[in-house]
Amino acid sequence: MSSIELANDSIESDYEALVSFMYLSPVGLVRTDLIGKIDMLNPKATQLLMPLVKSTGLENLFETLACAAPDLRNLVSSFRESCGSICENHRIHVSSAADGGIVLACTIVKVNDEVLITVLTDISSQVATERRLKQTDSWLDAIYTIVNDFAVLGLDKQGVINSWSPSAERLTGYAESEAIGETLGRFYSLSDMEVDVLKEQLIFAREEGWHSRDYLCQHKSGVNFFAQTMIAVLRDESDEFSGYTVVFRDITERKVSSDNLANLLTKDHLTGAANRAHFFNLAEKELARASRYEHSISIIMLDADHFKHVNDTWGHPTGDEVLKSIVKIAEGVLRPGDTIARFGGEEFVVLLPKSNSAETSAIAERLRSSIEASSVEAGDDEIKITVSIGCASLSQSRSTLKQLLVSADRALYQAKSRGRNCIVDIDDC
């Protein structure tokens, strides 16, 4: 074999090794030119970048990352050395904490005057941990600086109160003899739909080491107050799980202010129903709870019938009153724990935790008939309101929120096709 053939074999071997390394690497690797045009990327990089890919496709790295990290292109263009590290572990927030909190660490190395290598690593879990630690620091700072509004107590492995303190008696009004042997549910004002949170908070605390949540509580005198609760896992000398420590903080004044802000962020400004973003947040949490405890869950989608005719005939202010009337009636019909949200225009979606198909149909019929019996004044006229409703319940073929919404929307379309002012369950289509 000639020296040229040996050299070619060596080059081919090196290339195969490079390709193998890129495709098997647990981090995202992207090779581009200096303006970001992608020459090669591995499957992991494709996976990490897909949430940011637009209709133009995955052709230029800087264009793909522009919405989340517009500064990268400037970092590269301002780097004057012929080679070297341009940035290391530059954080790119792909989505907010509410949308999953995807965060990437980006390192860009300039190989020569023509080639950049970018390394992408998913550090979402690390950032989430940092966020929790910051919350813990805030908790500890509050405990040390505001000593009059917190209480400490202990729970055994089963979540039963086994130690009480004077501060706990001051905050709740209950003496030690009245609290020992009880659960935290003694102090929480929970609806029948929320009883599972007592189990959940202990499960989350065991999984994460601690868990924090706000609750509406009731003092022994009957006065309600808001409390922030942190539950931390206790371990004995052998590092075995032995129970929990609980810290209560009265946050009533802060809660009132934060609730006013929360309403601005989570409510539809016209109707008072939940907005679309808040609905998605609530629905994902309820689906996770349904999966954990094997509960049913259902979705109702409803649409105001002939709404365009209302706007065209009586004007948009009257149309607004129709939408507000639908929400007001729904809030009177729905159970505690159910949520109605404005999904867009005259379309609403209702989240029904712990509801199977039969229960959902019954709720939907009460909703439909109550709206049909109502009317909205428009000058000297009274406008009769009706809605079309589509229902879908959790099943093996509908196990995600997207599948539930698509199914409920399909059922709603069938309800409209059947003449409106009626209910269709997707299982009956």
Image (cartoon, rainbow, N blue to C red):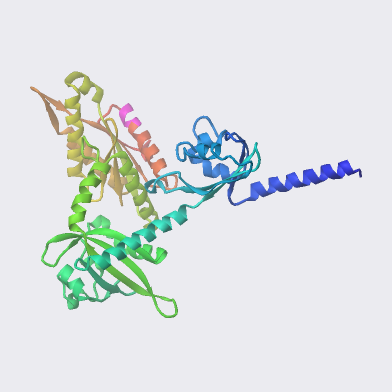
Task: Identify which residue, 145 or 254, lies in the foreground.
Answer: 145
- Residue 416 included in the magenta stretch of the image: yes
Rendered position, 96 above or below 149: above
Q: What residue lies at 62% left-to-right and 35% top-to-bottom?
A: 33
**Horizontal arrangement in the rendering, residue 316 relative to residue 296 (left or right):** left
Q: What residue lies at 19% left-to-right and 77% top-to-bottom?
A: 176
**Horizontal arrangement in the rendering, residue 224 relative to residue 266 (left or right):** left
Magenta residues span: 413-417
- Residue 268 included in the magenta stretch of the image: no
- Does residue 196 show up? no
Q: Quadrant of residue 138?
A: bottom left
Q: Quadrant of residue 152?
A: bottom left
Q: What residue lies at 10% left-to-right and 66% top-to-bottom?
A: 221
Task: Identify which residue, 335 or 225, lies in the foreground.
Answer: 225
Task: Identify which residue, 15 or 373, lies in the foreground.
Answer: 15
**Horizontal arrangement in the rendering, residue 299 relative to residue 208 (left or right):** left
The x and y percentages for residue 191 are 22, 56
